[in-house]
């Protein structure tokens, strides 16, 4: 499993490298978006590569949401596009040659638990020698302890933020929140009642709703499957690539890298298409509830 650089924010331990990756990815996406939008024009004679790329991306996401969500899909184009691009950029970030960082002395290092214990044991064992022989050997003991500690540490190899389960989980929770509120905004109280054990229907009074258990389980299972699918595939891809780089020098890792780049597109597409399916299902269900109520 990927090890992370940890730090404290507001008294809580967080994966600092994941935050940096996410911020860097968003900065890259924003910079590219600004670059592409600067080349847009309403004049067909001034169309260039940036115009074609921008319109191609928009058409792809627009057709995706229209097919899965329907006429209400227009409002979700920006959301679906953002999720797709964020996952793709972060997946590719984990495929970059971060292992080259071992050639730079300033590159982050991760402590090894066993090495840290060894360093501590070494320092404790030599403390008595310092007391016995005085300050003359103190410097030697200190340098020896630092040597042990340096061997205890190993180079940090970068990884995609999607290899940190917190990021896929956050994306999945966001999708489920949007899925629920999409249905609630259209179906109103009638839609919300599907998730409650007791319903009140005008003219029929109070009724018991045992089907709410299925709806609640569905609401809980969907983010779990979204999270595990993206997390597991990202970790598996990075592990496979790292393994081949360690075994073979050049040709085979390039082939695996090309395959993983395709898998990155596939993972981003699967996550976004499932998001569209979930939102589309909620919208259609809510529309049916409203239709039945009026008839």
Image: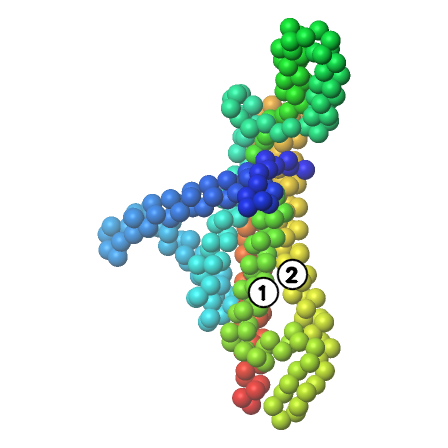
Kindly indicate the quadrant of the structure image that contains residue 289: bottom right
Q: How many marks?
A: 2
Front-most of residues 263 and 12: 12
**Front label number (2 vs 1):** 2
- Neighbor class of circle 1 (other Cα within 10 Å; few <14, some 14-19, many 20+) is many
Circle on res. 278: 1
Residue at the disc numbered 2: 222
Q: Secondary structure at mark 2?
A: helix
Determine if residue 251 is in view.
no
Q: Name the residue rendered at 71%, 12% in the picture.
A: 131
Residue 177 location in percent, x, y?
56, 64
Kindly indicate the quadrant of the structure image that contains residue 210: bottom right
Image quarter where the N terminus lies is top right
Front-most of residues 54 and 161: 161
Mark 2–mark 1 distance (CA, rounded to whole Å): 9 Å
Front-most of residues 260 and 174: 174
Residue 242 location in percent, x, y?
63, 31
Determine if residue 285 is in view.
yes
Q: Name the residue rendered at 64%, 14% in the picture.
A: 142
Front-most of residues 215 and 234: 215
From what the image shows, is residue 27 above or below residue 249?
Answer: below
- Tell me, yes or no, whether the two marked residues, 2 and 1, touch with CB atoms within 8 Å: yes
Q: Is residue 81 left or right of residue 14?
A: left
């Amino acid at each position: 499993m990927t090890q992370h650089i940890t730090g404290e924010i507001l008294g809580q331990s967080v994966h600092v490298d994941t935050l940096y990756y996410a911020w860097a990815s968003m900065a890259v996406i924003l910079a590219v978006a600004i670059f592409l939008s600067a080349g847009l024009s309403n004049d067909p004679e001034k169309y260039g590569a940036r115009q074609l790329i921008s319109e191609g991306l928009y058409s792809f996401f627009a057709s995706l949401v229209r097919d899965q969500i329907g006429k209400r899909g227009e409002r979700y184009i920006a959301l679906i596009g953002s999720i797709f691009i964020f996952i793709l950029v972060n997946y590719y970030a984990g495929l970059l040659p971060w292992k080259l960082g071992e050639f730079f002395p300033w590159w982050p290092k991760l402590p090894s638990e066993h090495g840290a214990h060894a360093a501590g044991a070494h320092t404790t064992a030599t403390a008595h020698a310092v007391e016995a022989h005085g300050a003359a050997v103190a410097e030697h003991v200190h340098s020896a302890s630092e040597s042990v500690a340096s061997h205890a540490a190993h180079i940090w190899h970068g990884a995609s933020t999607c290899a940190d389960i917190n990021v896929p989980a956050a994306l999945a929770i966001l999708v489920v929140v949007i899925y629920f509120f999409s249905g609630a905004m259209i179906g109103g109280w009638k839609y919300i009642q599907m998730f409650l054990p007791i319903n009140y229907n005008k003219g029929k009074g109070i009724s018991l709703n045992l089907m709410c258990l299925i709806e609640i389980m569905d609401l809980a299972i969907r983010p779990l499957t979204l999270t595990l699918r993206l997390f597991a595939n990202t970790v598996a891809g990075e592990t496979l690539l790292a393994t081949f780089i360690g075994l073979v020098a050049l040709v085979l890792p390039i082939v695996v890298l090309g395959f993983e780049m395709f898998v990155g597109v596939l993972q981003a597409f699967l996550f976004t298409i499932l998001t569209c399916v979930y939102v589309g299902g909620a919208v259609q269900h809510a529309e049916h509830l409203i239709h039945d109520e009026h008839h």
